[in-house]
Amino acid sequence: MRSPLLSIVAVFLPLAVLGEASDVNDQRLSIAIAGIEAQYPSCAVVTPTIRNNSKDRLYFEVYVEEMRDDARWSDVECQYDLADPRSEHIKRILTNPRMTDPGDSLTVKYDRCAAHVRCRARKSNQVMAERLRQELIRANGDAHPPVTQRFRVDVYEMADGHVRRIGQEYSRTLTRSGQQ
């Protein structure tokens, strides 16, 4: 029969090893996400800045997520990489990505209403843009709890000539009101 003390040590030993690996990973993911207020009107443009505080050159992909009714985060409709708006229309293959040097920043722009209109108009060409915009504003005004969003930054490094994802970081959350 095993002693209870040995069982506990066996359970905690792998967790301690994982914790050390996580600390090393956190050093490579040393980024800061700034420029986000706590609340915005429905159609306000948000321009977060992602700063590379690591010692390595990094590549960033920036996405918007939304809190769903079941309290889980998921991609917004018609998701695309805000750092490369071409990804809204074409599939990308990363062969020579634009790396961000240590100490440098990347600023992206998220125009929620314009993205919503482009997305929905692709799905239904007969729908007018202003109607879609007003529909989104009205939905935000009726939402209880309010629409909550955040930015997800997927962080990559170059390793042996290939882009390799090393982790994710999340911005502070923001809420959307039903105002214009």
Image (cartoon, helix red, strand yellow):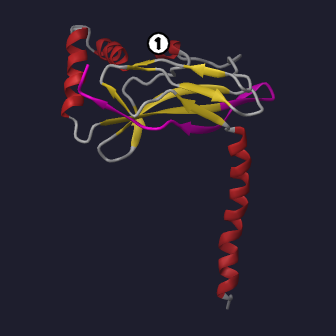
Instruction: Read off the residue under disc 1.
Output: 89
Quarter of the image where the C terminus is located = top left
What's the residue type where badge 1 is placed? His
Q: Residue furthest bottom?
A: 1
Query: Residue 104 in the image: x percent, y percent?
Result: 69, 22
* Range of magenta residues: 156-180
Crowding at label 1, few (<14), some or many (≥20) Cα neighbours within 10 Å?
few
x and y, in percent, of residue 162 in the image = 74, 26
Residue 50 lies in what quarter of the image? Answer: top right
Residue beneath the point at 56% across and 31% down = 33
91 to the left or right of 18: left
Magenta stretch: residue 148 in it? no
148 horizontally vs 19: left or right: left
- Determine the main secondary structure of the stretch shown in magenta: strand
Give yes or no for residue 167 being in the magenta stretch: yes
- Given residues 124 and 158, the one toward you in this image is 158
